[in-house]
Every structure is written in structure tokens, then in C-alpha cells.
Amino acid sequence: MGLQEKVANEPMLVYHFDIDGDDFSSAGQASVVIKNNLRQLGLSPEIIKRVSISMYEGEINMVIHAKGGTADVKVYEDCIEIILADKGPGIKDIEQAMQEGFSTASDTTRSLGFGAGMGLPNMKRYSDEMHIDSVVDVGTTVTMKINIA
């Protein structure tokens, strides 16, 4: 790989957020910041919507299931990469967790209107690529890519 190719693959912008666990009032703040920043960059409303929904769902999942984590967003010329990482309990059965309506959220969380089992399916639906790396009792990293061009 030549130097020009390396430079072309470097992100134009990088954002990092710490997601506070067990705090539903602050969940979604990172996705709002990203939405505003992408709007300032002049990206299309459709791209902004897809990034915002994907991030919000991931943030909520980290609050519900993992007591928080981190969100890193990298803006490239041709795509936006979102990396959500936590040190929560991990996902025991990823295939099952991807089914709409499946949830391991507590009754308390559900009584607050969260935990309907749509987080991961929505993240997949609104991203062009999604990869889940999860180890039980270690944590989960979800990487999503949303194409700009």
C-alpha cells in the first residue's frame, strides 16, 4: 500500500464518547452530538438519520445491558464507521439477539419503555455493514459502517 492510499484511508474526523451506564436520561446524547456535527458537514438527511438511529440504539443497549461503554465515530470520505464497545456481560446467542422482539432487558427497564428487542435489528437495518464481536463475561463490540457515497 502506497502512502497516498494510507492517507486516503485515514478518517477526516474522529469523535469519542464515554457512555454512562444506568442513566437513561443521558442515553442518546452522543447520537445527538453526532447528528449535529454531520448536519454541519452538509451530509444528507438520510445519512444523518441512519447514523443517529444506529448510534442511539447502541447507546441504549449499553445503558440497559452493559452499564455503559464507549462510542467512537470515524468519518471518512466515503463512509462513517461507528464502534460501540462495552465490558458488559456479553451476548450469549448473537443469532437469537438479532431476532426482532427478543430481549433480555429487566422488567424495570421495560416499565420505562425500553428493552423491546429492536436495538440490534434496528442497528443492522440502518447500517450498510454490521459486525458483532462478543465474549460472555468480557464484553461486546459492535462495528457499523454507513456508506456516504
Image: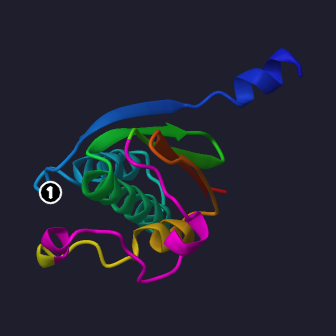
Q: How many marks?
A: 1
Given residues 43 and 126, the one toward you in this image is: 126
In screen coordinates, is 22 left or right of 52? left
Residue 48, given in percent of the width and then of the height, sits at: 43, 60
* Viewer-closest of 82 and 91: 91
Note whether residue 95 is visible: yes
Amino acid marked by disc 1: Phe
Instruction: State which quadrant residue 112 falls in.
Output: bottom left
- Answer whether residue 94 is magenta in the image: yes
Q: Is residue 121 left or right of residue 2?
A: left
Residue displayed at 35% across by 69% down: 104
Which quadrant holds the C terminus? bottom right
Question: Magenta stretch: dominant SS?
Answer: loop
Residue 138 vs 144, above or below: the answer is above
Instruction: Please name whichever residue, 17 or 119, is drawn nearer the observer in this view of the structure.
Output: 119
Q: Which residues are magenta?
A: 88-110
Quarter of the image for residue 71 reads top left
| Image position, residue 93 (x, y; %) | 56, 65
Color theme of the render? rainbow
- Tell me the residue at 37%/32% (across/down): 16
Helix or strand or loop: what does disc 1 sit on?
loop
In the rendered view of the protein, which quadrant contains the N terminus?
Answer: top right
Residue drawn at (28%, 46%), measured in percent from left and top?
Answer: 30
Percent x, y of residue 119: 40, 69
Q: Residue at x 57, y 64 (%)?
A: 94
Can you name the residue that lies furthest to the bottom here?
Answer: 101
The residue tagged 1 is 24
